[in-house]
């Protein structure tokens, strides 16, 4: 893979979709799709009617048409989804998913990468989260079937992923150890996937994509170099000013006067040590300017990863109304980015943009009836009978506590699964069928960077504008 100077951040859910990734890739840099909840996004697009036929065209290239016809028969609505009609959703993922559930994930990831790569020879990556383990095996294989060039992973220590990529490149069985709370010594829980159990026809050898690991420190990078099951091709070194989930500070959590986590110099990566590993690396977290790109290059990096500047481009997956609302607030200087130590069910700090009508508002959060109906951020735990249970700190408090969860873990937790889908125009109706799930926008601390591309709330800008700006001194 030709190393890019700019990696477009993999912003989930669906913000970094195939359109954005394709635009960046066609301009000569690394376009990245977010693989988080891509199965939900895929089937909701089908239920919205697939007006331009792009999804069905991509499906026609999938190597097993029986799978695609089953999916179309279940989820495709030619006339679109009526207003306030709930989207049909698949069963929640478990450690023992059914065959049709696995097929949906494989196909959805294939489609997203196929569309991102269609019609050009640029490079495309996929961003997945180690914290969301259950779909990852199937997501990786589906993306590889479509020829993904690069896999990017963070939010944990994905030591098993490089070896999985090696095995999938020639369709061998792979397994992934699943984190389960409360296990005893000797307990092991794994997910396994063997392509031969799903495809009867002989498939061609697949390209092994490059693997880039997102790390917040040189300590994590060293661990990946020593313990990874296969080749690590490079690192994205991400600081705490980046959007989405941030690595928690080391040691006991301290909060400042704004109730945000306090980061110390020890929480920052030592770039001298990063360079010693001899692998390519990119810097991320408020690096969205020409000067910061030059700073990264001077530090020995290949370039930068940039998310926020791309988040509100014409090609991004954010809904048009939400883009306009955020841009208006930025121009009026009424936006604030808060590093919320509690919002995410993962327990990681999560960047939240203050925005009227979103879950960032206390009243909107309090009036939403808790429900966990998508389950991507559920924690797995060992039940007294030895089986695996599932609980989410954002589900109803009573249910969470009955499953052995701590009451304090539920306080101020937000349902990111539904909120992030709302960001891209795929809201579900709430219990009263009149209101819809509210959005929750996550961006980096340098949100004001988009004023480099807009001067009024009616302005729009594209991914190519961002790249021209970033690369003007290169």
Image (spheres, rainbow, N blue to C red):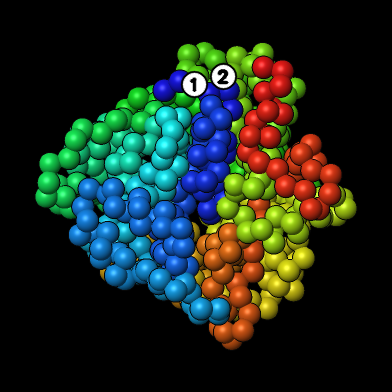
Image quarter of the N terminus: top left
Please give the residue where the numbered disc 2 appears in the rendered image. Answer: 302
Please give the residue where the numbered disc 1 appears in the rendered image. Answer: 3
Image: 76 above or below 269:
below
* Residue 436 in view of the camera: yes
Image: 9 above or below 222:
below
Q: Give how far apart the Cα atoms at labels 2 and 1 are.
A: 7 Å
Direction front: furthest residue: 52
Image: 179 above or below 73:
above
Q: In which image quadrant can residue 319 be found?
A: bottom right
In this rendering, the count of numbered labels is: 2
Percent across and percent down for residue 183 are: 34, 55
Q: Are marks 2 and 1 in contact (CB under 8 Å)?
A: yes
Q: Nearer the viewer, residue 177 or 424?
A: 424
* Residue pictured at 21% horizontal, 52% vertical: 64
Percent across and percent down for residue 267 are: 64, 33
* Residue pictured at 68% horizontal, 28% vertical: 468
Direction right: furthest residue: 332
* Residue pictured at 53% horizontal, 53% vertical: 14
Q: In which image quadrant can residue 342 be found?
A: bottom right
| Disc on the earlier residue, 2 or 1 | 1
Which marked residue is nearer to the observer: mark 2 or mark 1? 1
């Amino acid at each position: 893979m030709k190393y890019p100077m700019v990696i477009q951040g993999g912003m989930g859910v669906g913000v970094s979709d195939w359109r954005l990734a394709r635009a960046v890739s066609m301009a000569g840099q690394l376009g990245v799709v977010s693989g988080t909840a891509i199965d939900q996004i895929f089937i909701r697009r089908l239920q919205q009617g697939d007006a331009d036929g792009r999804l069905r065209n991509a499906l026609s290239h999938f190597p097993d048409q029986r799978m695609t016809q089953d999916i179309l028969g279940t989820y495709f609505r030619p006339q679109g989804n009526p207003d306030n009609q709930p989207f049909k959703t698949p069963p929640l993922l478990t450690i023992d998913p059914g065959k049709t559930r696995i097929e949906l994930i494989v196909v959805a990831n294939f489609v997203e990468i196929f569309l991102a790569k269609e019609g050009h020879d640029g490079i495309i990556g996929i961003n997945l989260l180690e914290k969301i383990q259950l779909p990852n095996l199937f997501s990786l294989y589906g993306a590889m079937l479509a020829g993904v060039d690069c896999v990017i992973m963070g939010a944990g220590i994905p030591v098993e992923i490089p070896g999985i990529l090696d095995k999938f490149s020639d369709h061998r069985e792979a397994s992934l150890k699943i984190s389960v709370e409360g296990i005893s010594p000797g307990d092991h829980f794994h997910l396994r996937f063997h392509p031969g159990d799903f495809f009867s026809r002989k498939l061609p050898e697949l390209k092994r994509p490059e693997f880039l690991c997102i790390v917040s420190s040189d300590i994590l990078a060293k661990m990946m170099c020593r313990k990874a099951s296969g080749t690590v091709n490079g690192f994205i070194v991400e600081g705490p000013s980046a959007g989405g989930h941030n690595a928690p500070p080391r040691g006991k959590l301290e909060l400042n006067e704004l109730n945000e986590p306090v980061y110390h110099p020890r929480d920052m990566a030592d770039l001298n040590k990063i360079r010693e590993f001899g692998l390519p690396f990119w810097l991320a977290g408020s690096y969205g300017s020409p000067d910061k790109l030059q700073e990264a290059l001077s530090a020995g990096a290949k370039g930068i990863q940039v998310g926020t500047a791309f988040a509100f481009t014409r090609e991004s997956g954010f809904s048009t109304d939400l883009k306009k609302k955020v841009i208006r607030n930025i121009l009026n200087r009424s936006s604030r980015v808060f590093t919320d130590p509690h919002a995410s069910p993962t327990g990681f700090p999560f960047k939240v943009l203050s925005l009227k009508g979103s879950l960032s508002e206390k009243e909107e959060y309090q009036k939403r009836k808790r429900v966990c109906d998508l389950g991507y951020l559920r924690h797995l735990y060992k039940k007294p009978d030895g089986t695996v249970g599932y609980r989410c700190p954002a589900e109803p408090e009573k249910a969470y506590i009955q499953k052995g969860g701590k009451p304090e873990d539920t306080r101020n937790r937000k349902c990111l699964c539904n909120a992030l889908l709302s960001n891209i125009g795929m809201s579900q109706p709430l219990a009263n069928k009149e209101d819809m799930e509210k959005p929750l926008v996550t961006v980096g601390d340098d949100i004001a960077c988009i004023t480099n591309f807009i001067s009024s709330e009616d302005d729009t800008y594209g991914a190519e504008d961002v790249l021209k700006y970033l690369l003007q001194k290169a």
